Amino acid sequence: MKQRINTFIFKVLIVIFSCAACSQTTKTKFGVQPIFSDNMVLQQGKEIPVWGTAPPRSGIEIQFRNQKVKTKADSRGKWLARLQPENVSLNEKMTIQCGNKKLTFSNVAVGEVWIASGQSNMEVPLVNDWAPVKNGIQEAANANFPDIRLFSVGHNSSNRPVDTLESAGWKPCTPTTIRNFSAIAYFFGREIHQDLEVPVGLIQSTWGGTLAEAWTSAASLELMEDFTRSVQKLQSMPTDLETQQKIYEKDKFDLNIERSRKDPGIMGSDTLFIKTLLRETDWDTIHLPDFWENSRLGVFDGSVWFRKHVEIPFGEASAEFTLGLGSPEDLYEVWINGRKIAQSQMWSPAKQYKIPSGVLRSGDNAITLRVTDFQGSGGFNGKPSDFFLSSEGGFFADLSGKWFMHAGYNQREIETIALEPGDPNRPSTLFNGMINPLIPFAFKGVIWYQGESNTGMAWQYRHLFTNLINDWREKWKEGDFPFYYVQLANYMKYKPYPADDMWAELRESQALALELPETGMAVSIDIGEAENIHPANKQDVGKRLSLLALNKTYGKDIPSSGPVFSSYTAGNGSISLFFENVYGGLKINDGSKLNGFAIAGEDKHFVWADAEIVGNTVIVKNKDIPLPVAVRYNWSANPNGNLVNSANLPASPFRTDDWDLITK
């Protein structure tokens, strides 16, 4: 009897101490990560990690369906418990208790959870005015899917890995909640939900204009020589923002000095290339609007100078003039006759500037632009009509077309590293702030759309992207979870001749990631827009990603890929190309002529080829190349190839050669 009383007293004391531990005022409060909230979706068929904080050594009890799991906070006040796998269900409740404090989450579902990540094309909301989605308003009005749940991760660029994230929690998909959510993720999730008839959870962790290295952990990046110095500098930064800002200001000053010192257009305080009497005898030429990667300058990050001369008739220079310029990649400065009149912000839209009186004069006028590009494509986007000089008196000069061009400083030669606090493109910082806090939440797989910002370093991307995928898998320790991604869509002006192209090289780097297990690539080479880096057709992108998931992850017997080049043979003046994933056969998507194929001999000079479908093979030839050795297909930023399979899914761009690339 005495022993029973003692046992009872001991249990009561345990409860009292546990309540006291969770109730006392400490630095570590009882709570869970924002990923756990009302309306959440938990992944079916997997262990379900649940974690949070509590006063050190305090007990935690979690109840969900028929499970009751207990754990304890460690000495740092962190705790983690794992629920056993569950089957699909709806309208469940989860409770998490620490002493006399209790959290209750309602309308919990068990189903399929996918993470959607990348840059702006994955981030584009279903309804917006900066990158409109096709039929976006109507799509939103029809988005009554209470069993699709949405979770958005707030933007956070962090020097070091953090445990928590900013979010408003899970929301059921309604015409209101879907408006600001990723269009591609929604269209993907809708297909999965309707086909499998299960709840679907979509976690959006995106940031427009960002580099892949920002989404990769420091530990992984340190293995790549290109990022070692930046990562080490970032990790050595003090934690307080004020000191970080002071370091950045000094580094930025040193960086600008180095850039000016290495720019041939600048000598000390004198800007040489803005002088009116300068003659461009050793300058190259380019036709604007365009990116200089499409010129003889090729892949180049840094500054580039442009000059154009305009003749103004006698007596008209006193009128009020307007200068129109396209959208820069990334920013520009403008001088007329040696006088600075404007400068743009990063990625600003096409602008028009009023010219101050006294700047222009009768006769020759020199317009000088200095464009600085930090990553990806450099130059001008937009329409020819964006470039003009006009006056109220009726004068008009079309400034599109031929400009003189001269390289300034080369970013690759710059040694100073300036890391601006909060900049989302600092290596590892988005992994730290927007991916790490999700670990170890259970999910089925990842959909990814990114790469536009890395086109200038396309060769590097073939290693960086596979590192990113392996990195995420290693950090989650859940094996080779599905990782499906979008190959870059067609974009920019159509090139009427075969040429090297960094967008084509980036697509090849993306395709090489298919060598990793449980990966898939949605080809979007046929649904882009020449003048819009954010094409409106997000429906087909989401659909093609869902085909990969339904086929490769969920075992549906459906076509999920377009034709994929596998091998070739050369002989009799032609090259025969063989493909996988032809399904019912190869065909031409539109028109009667097969386009997009270029052929070369030993001289490595590509010309357009005649191509013909013969069964599941494409025969490529050109009468002027009797001994062809290589073929490239859709090797351009915005190609016109039209090879598809019986499912109308496009062939991925490819090349048969292994010749040096321009971004290597």
Image (cartoon, rainbow, N blue to C red):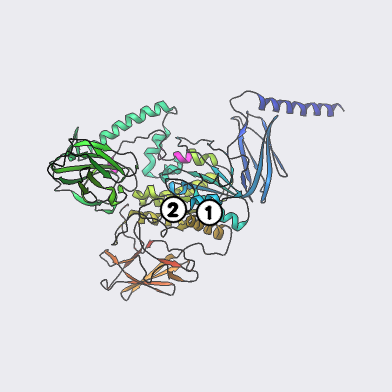
Q: Mark 2 points at which residue?
A: 536
Q: Position of residue 279 (x, y in %)?
A: 13, 45
| Segment colored magenta | 410-432
Q: Position of residue 653 (x, y in %)?
A: 39, 61
Could you say which quadrant of the image residue 438 lies in? Answer: top right
Q: Where is residue 99 in the image (x, y as percent from the top left)?
A: 70, 30
- Is residue 605 rendered to the left or right of residue 619? left
What is the three-letter code of the residue carrying label 1?
Phe
In the foreground, 663 or 74 = 663
Q: Is residue 615 above or below residue 155?
A: below
Q: Residues within 10 Å of mark 1 (few under 14, many from 20)?
A: many
User: Looking at the magenta stretch, what is its main secondary structure?
Assistant: loop
**Which residue extends farthest top?**
25
Residue 431: in magenta span? yes
Q: Is mark 1 on a helix, strand or loop?
A: helix
Q: Is mark 2 on a helix, strand or loop?
A: loop
Residue 78: in magenta span? no
Q: Position of residue 580 (x, y in %)?
A: 46, 67
In the foreground, 57 or 372 = 372
**Marking on residue 133:** none
- Is residue 516 rendered to the left or right of residue 6? left
**Which residue extends farthest front?**
393
Residue 648 visible? yes
Q: Mark 1 points at which residue?
A: 188
What is the three-letter code of the residue carrying label 2?
Ala
Task: Measure how far apart labels 2 and 1 are at the Cα level.
Answer: 15 Å
The quarter of the rendered structure image containing the N terminus is top right
